[in-house]
Image (cartoon, grey):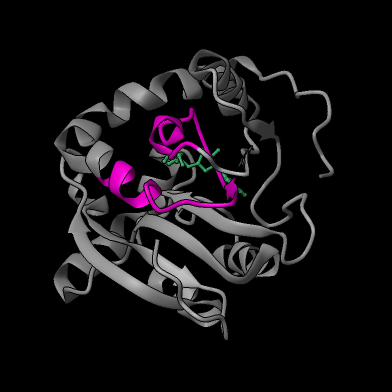
């Protein structure tokens, strides 16, 4: 794997943003998100690559017996906390500072890609999704939990109206992306559940949780 170099030193601002991330999410975690992470990640298998792994809130939910766990995260402040979370967990995992648009692994080399609340933040979700499709093996799966544009016209109009303000407040997150359409453009969604991200502002309530396959591959559950 390329890109496992010397970690970048975070700025004070990056350290601060990373430090307040878990407290900001806490209510949502307690009101269902933690349980949702556990359910989604229980089916991870083989060589697993997580994009935008943040502070490591998914780490404790991965099953034992994975071939490899690679956690990618481009923000130096988040990556610093992620490395600390890995050390505390005692789990074998590699942290790589990389963005989802340029994953440092070979084509068709990953069994499971994980993305939880990341495609809202990457500058170009279509490029990140193409990269995910590139690294997945035939039969490989994307496990995702992403907040999305509402299917209800009034709620969607509100998301569009406040998207720029929300982006400035929420560290680059866009609340008005139709991410399921983006996933469908490169992968085959096999299971999708629409849920509400309770405990968070209503702009990010609509969420899709599911599994998408690399095209042309047979679906193997579990
Ligand atoms: C809302 S947080 C989600 C963190 C984590 N996945 C979770 O479930 O708690 C969004 C994450 O995406 C990361 N991010 C920002 N730009 C990115 C990019 N281009 N590629 C991958 N991740 C990115 C951020 O640094 C941040 O850690």
Quick check: 92 above or below 136?
above
Quick check: 12 above or below 203?
above
Stretch in magenta: 36-64
Residue 113, quarter of picture: bottom right
Q: Residue at x 45, y 18 (%)?
A: 19
Q: Position of residue 48 (x, y in %)?
A: 58, 49
**Left or right side of 106 for 204:** left
Quick check: 62 above or below 162?
above
Let me know if residue 51 is in the magenta part.
Answer: yes
Q: Position of residue 94 (x, y in %)?
A: 67, 32
**Left or right side of 121 for 162:** left
Query: Can see residue 165?
Result: no
Q: Position of residue 190 (x, y in %)?
A: 38, 76
Q: Residue furthest front?
A: 65
The residue closer to the viewer here, 76 or 38, is: 38
Q: Residue furthest bottom?
A: 216
Let me know if residue 170 is in the magenta part.
Answer: no
Residue 191, quarter of picture: bottom left
Q: Position of residue 196 (x, y in %)?
A: 17, 54
The residue closer to the viewer here, 179 or 40, is: 40
Q: Residue at x 24, y 34 (%)?
A: 29
Q: Residue at x 77, y 49 (%)?
A: 104
The residue closer to the viewer here, 74 or 155, is: 74
Quadrant placement of the N terminus: top right
Quadrant placement of the C terminus: bottom left
Query: Can see residue 221?
Result: yes
**Left or right side of 169 for 31:** left
């Amino acid at each position: 794997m390329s890109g496992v170099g010397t970690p970048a030193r975070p700025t004070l601002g990056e350290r601060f943003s990373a430090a307040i991330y878990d407290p900001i999410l806490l209510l949502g975690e307690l009101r269902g998100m933690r349980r949702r992470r556990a359910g989604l990640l229980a089916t991870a298998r083989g060589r697993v690559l997580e994009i935008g792994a943040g502070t490591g809130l998914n780490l404790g939910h991965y099953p034992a017996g994975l071939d490899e766990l690679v956690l990618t995260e481009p923000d130096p402040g988040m990556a610093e906390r992620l490395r600390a979370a890995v050390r505390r967990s005692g789990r074998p995992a590699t942290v790589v500072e990389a963005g989802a648009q340029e994953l440092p692994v070979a084509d068709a080399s990953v069994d499971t890609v994980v993305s939880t609340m990341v495609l809202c933040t990457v500058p170009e979700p279509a490029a990140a999704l193409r990269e995910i499709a590139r690294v997945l093996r035939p039969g490989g799966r994307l496990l995702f939990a992403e907040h999305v544009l509402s299917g209800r016209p009034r709620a969607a109009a509100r998301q569009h109206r406040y998207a720029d303000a929300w982006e400035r407040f929420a560290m680059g997150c866009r609340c008005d992306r139709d991410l399921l359409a983006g996933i469908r453009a490169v992968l085959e969604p096999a299971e999708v559940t629409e849920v509400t991200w309770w405990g968070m502002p209503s702009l990010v309530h609509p969420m899709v949780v599911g599994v998408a396959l690399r095209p042309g591959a047979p679906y193997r559950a579990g």
